[in-house]
Image: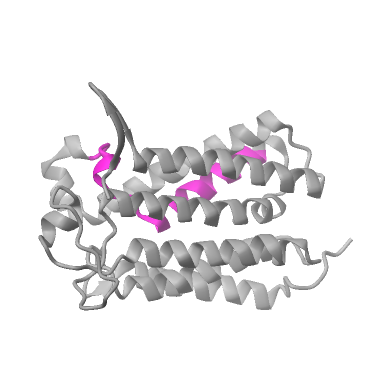
Amino acid sequence: MHPILFEYGPIQIRFYGLMYVIAILVGNYLIKKEVDRKGIPLSGDDVMNFVIWTVVGGIIGARLYYVAFNWGFYSANPSEIPAVWHGGLAIHGGMIGGIIAAFMYLKRKDIRFWRMADSVAPALILGQAFGRFGNFMNGDAHGRPTDAPWGIVFPPESIAGAENPGVPLHPTMLYEMSINLSIFLFLWLYLRKRAHRDGFVFAAYIALYSLGRFVVEHFRADSLMLGPIKAAQFVSLVIAAVAIAIIISRRLWEPQRK
């Protein structure tokens, strides 16, 4: 694997950036289909603006979250703060930033947040799957050394290869990509078409992704830490518990009240 898909002179097309472009285009298509199916009053241009607005908010939130947990390094190297192509986007920060941006946009359009959130959830988890493939080609978000037959030796120029030269590592990016694709299929092919209250699909996405991330994080080698605890595992458990509690307390699986 190699982080650069195409290079001509000073022009580079990286897998990392390409996956974001694909995620935006595919996500826009899926969200538009759901918006039309649900009768949400947003035009095609509105949906694209919503997607761009949310993605930008997500990237900013993901980067700020990562930088905050690694402030010792970034305070000494401020020029690295915007260098997202070197790795360093935390999904939980991205979720926070994206939700804030989405809420602000939908409030301007007078659209119910939870109804739209259900329309976005399948596209969001699919976009995360694309992103993990970008991580794989980039050699970041990598796992611990392993003797498993599917362990991967990453190129020495990648982050994973530089930190563990010649050592097979857990391909945690592919673990999480597989989980994300499974969640997408469940949400898109089954859950979204069933009668339920607004917020059920989104809450299910949050709970399922968080539980999957908790498991994958066990194999990660580059985790952000909260003292002696892996921050992603702690946050994932909290978020999953909150999402499940909301589903149960609000009985979101029941048909929407008129």
Q: Is residue 248 left or right of residue 176?
A: right
In the displayed orientation, state which residue is furthest to the top.
9
Q: Does the segment drawn in magenta span residue 241?
A: no
- Residue at 28%, 40% (x, y): give it: 85
Q: Which image quadrant is residue 51 in?
A: top right
In the image shown, does 189 or 203 lie closer to the viewer? Answer: 189
Q: Nearer the viewer, residue 31 or 174?
A: 174
The foreground one among 203 and 139 is 139
Please name the residue shown 13% across and 40% down the image. 77
Based on the displayed image, in which of its 4 quarters is residue 251 positioned? bottom right
Return the x and y of residue 168 as percentages of the image width and height. 19, 68
Q: Is residue 65 visible?
A: no
Q: Quadrant of the C terminus?
A: bottom right
Q: Main secondary structure of the magenta part?
A: helix
- The type of colouring in the image is one colour
Report the side of 85 relative to 121 (left or right): left
Magenta region includes residue 103: yes
Q: Is residue 133 left or right of residue 104?
A: left
On screen, residue 226 above or below 72: below
Q: Which residue: 35% across, 42% down?
A: 15
Number of numbered tags placed on the structure image: 0
Q: Residue 227 in the image: state x and y as whole percent.
A: 22, 71
Can residue 232 be seen? yes
Residue 1, above or below 165:
above
Q: Residue furthest right?
A: 258
Q: Which residues are magenta?
A: 81-107
Q: Position of residue 24 (x, y in %)?
A: 53, 40
